[in-house]
Each structure stands twice: as C-alpha cells, then as structure tokens.
Image: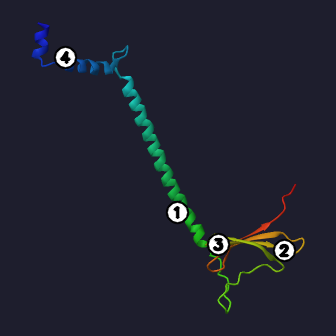
C-alpha cells in the first residue's frame, strides 16, 4: 500500500530524495524553532559581509569627493607662479640667485631640475623649473642635517 501511496501522490524515488534533502536543510533547535542549515548560514554571513563592504566603500568614495571639493578652493586662491621673462632673442630667462652657478641639470620633458651651488658658506639649492615657460615651480634650499 505504501508503494501505491508513492505512485498516487506523484513522488518518484528521485523526487522523494530531493524532498528529504530539503527537509534536512532546515534544522530544528530544542525550542522547536527552525534554524538555517550550515550552508545557508555561510551564505547569510557572506551576504552581510559584502553588504558592509559595499557601504564602507561607498562612504570612502563620498568622503574622497568631499575632501577634494573642499581642498580645490584652497588651490584656486594661490596664484600660479609668474612666467619667467623672455629675452629679445626668444630665450626664457630663468632667475638664478646672485652668486650661484648651475652645477647640474636634469629634466623629464615638462620640468627642469637645476642643482645650484652658491658661494662659500651658502647652502646648495635645487630649483624645479617649468620647461615651457621658465616658471620656477619650486625652490629648495639644502641645509645640513643637525646632529
């Protein structure tokens, strides 16, 4: 009669095995409440962690945009360095401090880095110059490190 019941209800051996697996996926605790099986718990933890990472990543993007917007006003207030004067022959005159001479020059296509040596007792200097218009972008004074 049990065989008739299985065939009458439309269950096949494969379907009844799937039904048993589905029942095994839900585990009951002592109070009778159902708890998700281990695989479902792992999936739940993965979804929660990825959701937290998504929220944290979005917050970092918003904070980065806000800080760049806030700092962009400061840069706009600083006037760009004036271009070096151009001589009658079309050469750009780069202002070198009095008494200093160029020791070495290095460049990368957009900038020239000038290593300057001064008179005895004066610190050496590094000047970063825009190669197109001769503007002094940065001037560094090399001082000895205190012991």
Q: Secondary structure at mark 2?
A: loop
Q: Which residue is mark 2?
A: 118
Provide the residue designation for mark 4. Answer: 13
Distance (Cα) linking label 3 and label 1: 27 Å
Q: Determine whether 4 is above or below 86 in the image.
A: above
Local packing at callout 1 (Cα closer than 10 Å; few below 14, some 14-19, many 20+) is few
Q: Residue furthest top?
A: 1
Cα separation between marks 2 and 4: 96 Å
Count residues near mark 3 (Cα–Cα under 10 Å), then give few for <14, some for 14-19, many for 20+: some
- For this orientation, the residue located farthest to the bottom is 88
Cα distance in 3D space between marks 1 and 4: 66 Å
Q: Which mark is residue 126?
A: none
In 3D space, how far apart are the residues under numbered discs 2 and 3 (Cα atoms)? 22 Å
Q: Which residue is mark 3?
A: 111
Q: Residue 144: give x, y in percent of width and height.
A: 84, 62
Can you give x and y, in whole percent of width and height, for residue 93 in the image? 70, 84
Q: Residue at x 87, y 75 (%)?
A: 119
Instruction: Say the numbered circle drawn on residue 69.
Output: 1
Nearer-N-terminus badge (3/1): 1
User: Are discs 2 and 3 less than 8 Å apart at CB?
Assistant: no
Badge nearest the viewer, 1 or 4: 4
Earlier in the chain: of badge 2 and badge 3, it is 3
Q: Are marks 1 and 4 in contact (CB under 8 Å)?
A: no
In terms of image quadrants, where is residue 24? top left
């Amino acid at each position: 009669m049990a065989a008739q019941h299985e065939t009458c209800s439309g269950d096949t051996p494969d379907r009844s095995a799937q039904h048993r697996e589905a029942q095994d996926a839900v585990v009951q605790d002592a109070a009778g409440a159902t708890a998700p099986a281990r695989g479902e718990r792992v999936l739940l933890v993965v979804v929660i962690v990825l959701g937290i990472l998504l929220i944290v990543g979005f917050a970092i993007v918003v904070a980065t945009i806000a800080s760049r917007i806030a700092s962009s006003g400061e840069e706009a207030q600083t006037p760009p360095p004036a271009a070096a004067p151009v001589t009658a022959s079309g050469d750009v005159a780069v202002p070198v401090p009095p008494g200093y001479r160029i020791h070495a020059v290095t460049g990368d296509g957009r900038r020239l880095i000038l290593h300057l040596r001064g008179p005895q007792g004066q610190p050496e200097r590094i000047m970063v110059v825009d190669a197109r218009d001769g503007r002094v972008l940065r001037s560094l004074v090399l001082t000895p490190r205190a012991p």
